[in-house]
Image (cartoon, rainbow, N blue to C red):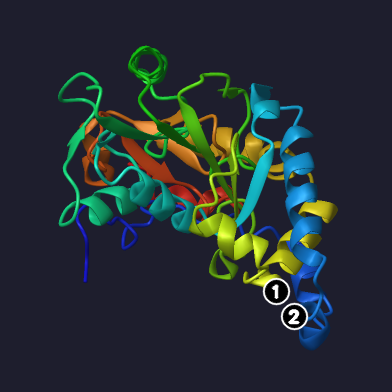
Amino acid sequence: MKFEYDKRHLPFGHAVAVPDPQVLSYLDGLRLNLLGICEDKTISNQFLKNYKNWIESSTLNTFKGLEKFTHSCFSNGTTEAFEKFYHKNSTRRFRCFKGEYLYHKLAWRNTHPWEWLDDSSIGPNDAVVISLPFSNTGNEHHNHKTVMKECEALNVPVLIDCAYLGICSNVDFDLSYECITDITFSLSKTFPVAHARIGMRLTKEDDDDILFVSNKSDYINRLSCFIGNAVVTEFSPDYIPTKYRDKQLEICNKLGIQPSNTVLFGNATVEKYKEYNRGGDTNRLGLHNFLTRPINELDEYVE
């Protein structure tokens, strides 16, 4: 089934991790002692500690307020953490920007009241999801700070989705707002491990929700923890954006589009790229297919 705004059939229409040869070789060489990993009761805590340290080690981005989020849980990508946020705020109206990660709209459409942030102001009974960098551009959304101030004033709970941390640079992660209750991270866009579903949720409090319960009972995917632990130990959060920034700029220059702060993307407002519109005010082009290939392979897409 093809969903609205699903662009994966187009040459620049999807967001997938860069098939970096060094990362692929490293993953291919991992020695997976399946039984040993599944019986390792320490692997989840090791991963969560190393993953948070990995995030904080980025020198290409800045963080403010991350230290307030002292509780970490393994999550199956960001998606599992989203669902827990929906459940905890099920009596509220959900809000996100146009062009946000499609999963939210699909999750809310039949079960929860919701409305685009673009269409009306924040209400006191809202709950907000915002990606930073923003899913539709790879930059901070131009109304991000305005919405955050509104949420702060009304004490509206906010989940910040940082799934692009590991492929971005020059992003100011201001997580100091008291209204932020959940922060989510995933390795799916940084490394080609999307189907291992490796993620983490950070919160300020332990409210003993079901994600805490599954983590406390250690009923989580230890194999994913092992893989995640391996890649964050071997590669820095700045590895991909540093290695591919120049190639991203070269591709964007050739296509006549604007480079994003997230190395996977370029953005355009011109009519030529309107088929890449995902519902926002720009057209996002995914560059992952070309970041490891010769630049002349783009010739067929340039007039």
Q: Nearer the viewer, residue 227 or 35?
A: 35
Query: Residue 287: x and y, percent?
Result: 49, 48
Query: Residue 4: x and y, percent?
Result: 19, 55
Q: Is residue 101 visible?
A: yes
Q: Which residue is mark 1?
A: 223
Q: How many marks?
A: 2
The alpha-carbon separation of the residues under discs 2 and 1 comes to 7 Å
Left or right, 212 with respect to 154, comes to right
Q: Nearer the viewer, residue 140 or 110?
A: 110
In the picture as drawn, the residue positioned furthest to the front comes out as 208
Which residue is drawn at the image coordinates 25% and 33% (left, top)?
A: 280
Q: Which residue is mark 2?
A: 38
**Which quadrant, please, contains the N terminus?**
bottom left
Q: Is residue 293 visible?
A: no
- Of labels 2 and 1, earlier in sequence is 2
Of helix, strand and loop, which one carries label 1?
Answer: helix
Mark 1: amino acid: Leu
Which residue is drawn at the image coordinates 84% and 79% (left, top)?
A: 31
Quarter of the view holding residue 187: bottom right
Mark 2: amino acid: Cys
Q: Nearer the viewer, residue 222 or 217?
A: 217
**Which quadrant, please, contains the C terminus?**
top left
